[in-house]
Amino acid sequence: MNNALDILLVEDNADLADNIIDYLETLGHRLHYAADGEAGLREALTRPIDVILLDLALPRRDGLDVCADIRRRADHHLPILMLTARDTLDDKLAGFASGADDYLVKPFSLAELAARITALGQRPQLGRSYQIAIGPLTIDRQLRTATRAGQPLRLSPLLWDILLLLAEASPQPVVRSEIARKLWGDEPPPSDALRSHIHLLRQIVDKPFDRAMIETVHGVGFRLSVPQ
């Protein structure tokens, strides 16, 4: 199976776990299993896992706590599908607030479970590291922090978003219209607003250091490059 995934199932109901494992293995996926929250967290942080199926009501540590801890401690994005018999809106919101990517209410069909897993496995953030390193610049997507040569860069939310756009595209340039669209949607401010924000960003990212990293690509936009 070309799209086989390493799946971690954290579920204390042994009969349900057996059914899920048997079904998903017949589809070609590789299953790993934990019966309680502590074991599930340990497996999630030590094994190469593509998707996590996480029950909410678990012994030793509940699923919400495990999910939140994975988000805090993993160094890359691990897609998490929460499995639970709790079906109120507040329960679902609590699951998403703890970091779940999707939510499936018991009882569910195994075919729907497989479809949800496939969708999660195809998301672009699968396995993506939270950190981007470009020369002396390090950006942490999860913490929304940036440092250059080990020095923290104090950025407003808008400047952070611009820097992240440039970092994710580096070394390719990002066109001005694309930056404006990502920041302001279909109602961008006057054209000089972006220029002003780029100027402010350069004051923080470049000015205190010997060499500039933010380059203007004339007629196109801006890019981040490693100083030579």
Image (spheres, grey):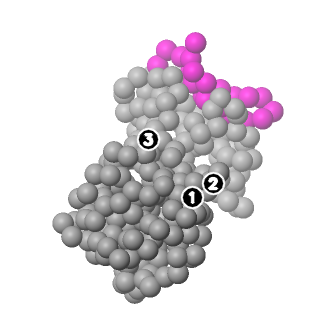
Expressed as whole percent of the image width and height from the top left, the position of residue 194 reads: 65, 44
Pick the residue in front: 50 or 198.
50
The image shows residue 161, relative to residue 39, as above or below, that is above
Distance (Cα) linking label 3 and label 1 = 34 Å
Quarter placement of the C terminus: top right
Residue stretch in magenta: 209-228
Going by the numbered disc 1, the residue's amino acid type is Gly
Q: Residue 173: name its quadrant.
A: top right
Res 137 visible: yes
> How much space separates mark 2 and mark 1, taking CA atoms?
6 Å
List the residue tagged with mark 1. Answer: 28
Q: Main secondary structure of the magenta part?
A: loop
Depth check, mark 3 against mark 2: the one in front is: 2
Identified at 56% across, 17% down, the residue is 227
Residue found 29% across the figure and 55% down from its top = 41
At label 2, the amino acid type is Met
Q: Nearer the viewer, residue 88 or 166?
A: 88
Residue 117 falls inside the magenta stretch: no
Of badges 3 and 1, the one in the foreground is: 1
Q: Which mark is residue 106?
A: none
**For mark 2, what is the residue?**
1
Q: Secondary structure beneath disc 2?
A: loop
Q: Amino acid at mark 3?
A: Asp
Residue 225 among those drawn in magenta: yes
**Mark 1 nearby-residue class (10 Å; few <14, some 14–19, many ≥20):** some
